[in-house]
Amino acid sequence: MAKKGNKIRVQVILECTEQKESGVPGISRYITTKNKKNTTQRLERKKYNPYLKKVTLHREIK
């Protein structure tokens, strides 16, 4: 049984990588959770960016 207060799943913020490079105003961010014990590296997901109106790569930020 897991100990109380032992947080394995943490909330992370995903931010669009293409929008920073293109110079379009606005920030596309998504909040999700990840298991920090199994996934130690940063998350990368393809998500919809409403400012660019297309699916782009979003990476985890600190």
Image: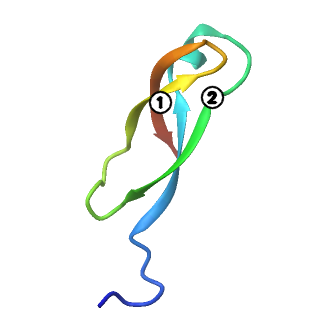
The residue drawn where x is 37% and y is 44% is 42
Q: Please, is residue 61 above or below residue 26 in the view?
A: below
How many numbered badges does the structure rendering display? 2
Q: Position of residue 31 (x, y in %)?
A: 56, 47
Percent position (x, y) of residue 17? 50, 23
Left or right? Give the position of 8 relative to 14. left
Image quadrant of residue 59?
A: top left
Mark drawn on residue 28: 2
- Asked if 54 appears above or below 40 in the picture, the reply is above
In this rendering, position of residue 30 left or right of residue 2:
right
- The amino acid beneath tag 1 is His
Pointer 1 residue? 58
Residue with the most extreme right position:
25
Q: Residue at x 25, y 60 (%)?
A: 38
Query: Closer to the N terminus: mark 2 or mark 1?
Result: 2
Tell me where residue 23 appears, x and y as whole percent. Answer: 66, 10
- The structure residue drawn at horizontal position 40% and vertical position 33%, both measured from the top left corner, is 45
On screen, residue 45 versus residue 12, left or right, reads: left
> For the N terminus, which image quadrant?
bottom left
Instruction: Please determine whether, in this image, residue 28 is positioned above or below residue 43.
Output: above
Crowd rating for badge 1 (residues with CA inside 10 Å; few <14, some 14–19, many 20+): many
Indicate the quadrant where residue 52 lies: top right
Q: CA distance from mark 2 to mark 1?
A: 9 Å
The amino acid type, in three-letter code, at marker 2 is Ser
Q: Tell me, yes or no, whether the two marked residues, 2 and 1, touch with CB atoms within 8 Å.
A: yes
Rendered location of residue 12, percent (x, y): 51, 51
What residue is drawn where x is 47% and y is 30%? 58
